[in-house]
Image: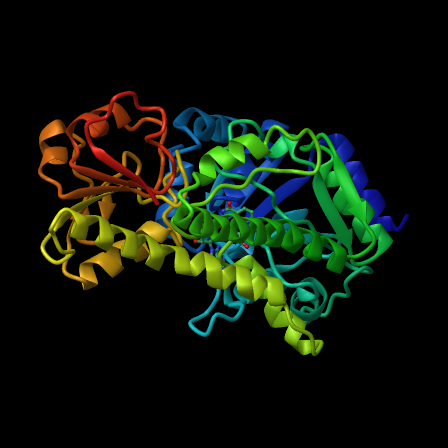
Amino acid sequence: MSKLSKLFSQKLKNKTVKVGIIGMGYVGIPLGLEFAKKKFNVLGFDKDKKRVEDIKAGSQVMKHINEENMREFIDNGGSATTDFTKINAMDCLIICVPTPLDIHEQPDMSYVESATNLISKNIKKGQLIVLESTTYPGTTRELVKPILEKSGLKAGKEFFLAYSPEREDPGNKDFNVSEIPKVIGGYTKECLNVANSLYKNIVSKTVKVSSMETAESTKLMENIFRAVNIAMVNEMKLILSRMKVNIWEVIEAAKTKPFGFMPFYPGPGMGGHCIPIDPFYLSWKAKEYNTEAKFIELAGEINRKMTENISHRIGKALNDDGKSIRNSKIMILGVAYKKDIDDMRQSPALKLIDLLEFKGARISYHDPYVKKLNDKKSVELTSKNIELQDALVITTDHTNIDYDLIGKHAKLVIDTRNAMAKISNPTARILSA
Ligand SMILES: NC(=O)c1ccc[n+]([C@@H]2O[C@H](COP(=O)([O-])OP(=O)(O)OC[C@H]3O[C@@H](n4cnc5c(N)ncnc54)[C@H](O)[C@@H]3O)[C@@H](O)[C@H]2O)c1
């Protein structure tokens, strides 16, 4: 054990390790809360001044993390800042910034580069730097390490470097950060052990892997697994609906198999900051190795087409009522990308609204968690508002929506989530799409 890692472990024992989190978003905040709960001194760094002010005030900044949790963070000594020179006072820095795709659908590494540059300018000997943002295999070694070493300090010798993917599932009440095993890969064995010694304090299980690339690939495999299976079930839905077979009933029946099957559900397309994006980080990197990622590309193509397919279904259903999309009043129910959260990133509902407005529809929306959407405001879900619509489209099946009221007052419901299945005696015409 080197002198620097002995010092780190001594600080861990004394509970004096200062944890800096770069990027206080959907991933950074829950992680910070968990460290603060375990009495670590946590400082969140973010470029967004308002976000920092809200955190410092203990305000609720996202739906699934309530004010009580935010207050607990402050009471435990947690805080946030836009002053990146304070990086120098930290013992470890965890990078949780966005990794989107650029306009050419290629990895946009600008946030990771910018956060790493800020660390590099303020780095101190003995610090542990961990990248948690989802990314292609090789990022930590090929992109992050050289930027950090511009400081003159050497990875593995003067600072510790590791990659550990975040597996947070916002809104999932069954698992919180501490219950999800944490995969960790280190630049050296010592880096791995130092990172492991830190994370052991906040999660019930850590999974040490042999390299940073293995840890980076693990996260991608998990999300590609989801993207491909969602595409498979979406494709089956398209085939089975022509055969008048209900995909939802098929899934329920298949779920009874006690081994070798795991349910995935169809929907209006892919949403969120992960599934529509992360797989393409691997397909991009694969090209460098003269290889193709056919499953990823095909899954992307099928999942993207689902939104267009739903718009065709809406057009056909209105046509059957003697109406056109042009000038029809259509209410979109749920604009968040999945149920019971307020995150709209990459939400298929947004693309569907664009497609329908392009065809001349008069769109309104209702989402209990998204009050404003560009120039629109969420309308109230009243019997009168429902009756005024030519069609309602359920894009996100939030739990607290009154589906009975919809069943009673709507003329036409296009249900992409099987939300209306439990309604007894609806008078509305309901189409599963
Ligand atoms: N959201 C999820 O469910 C989820 C789950 C697992 C992994 N991830 C991954 O975690 C990473 C972060 O995602 P997120 O959803 O938390 O993003 P987010 O947009 O919610 O939060 C990112 C935060 O980083 C800040 N930021 C951007 N550039 C910065 C910089 N240079 N310095 C400091 N702060 C900066 C932003 O202001 C924002 O507050 C991504 O790589 C994502 O793929 C996300």
**Above or below: residue 162 compared with residue 17:** below
Coloration of the structure image: rainbow
Q: Residue at x 22, y 57 (%)?
A: 356
In this orientation, does residue 100 appear?
Answer: no
Image check: 279 left or right of 420? right
Name the spot of residue 209 as percent of width and height, x first. Answer: 80, 49
Q: Residue 288 versus residue 423: which sits nearer the camera?
A: 423
How many numbered discs sit on the rendered protein? 0
Q: Quadrant of residue 361?
A: bottom left
Q: Residue 427 versus residue 219: which sits nearer the camera?
A: 427
Name the spot of residue 67 as percent of width and height, x first. Answer: 39, 28
**Above or below: residue 243 compared with residue 112:** above
In the orientation shown, which residue stands out farthest toward the front?
243
In this orientation, does residue 399 appear?
Answer: yes
**Above or below: residue 214 compared with residue 63:** below
**Above or below: residue 125 compared with residue 247:** below
Q: Residue at x 70, y 38 (%)?
A: 260
Image check: 197 left or right of 246? right
Q: Residue at x 44, y 41 (%)?
A: 245
In the orientation shown, which residue stands out farthest toward the right?
1
Name the spot of residue 89 as percent of width and height, x first. Answer: 62, 49
Q: Residue 132 versus residue 432: which sits nearer the camera?
A: 432
Q: Quadrant of the C terminus?
A: top left
Name the spot of residue 59 as percent of width and height, x first. Answer: 37, 33
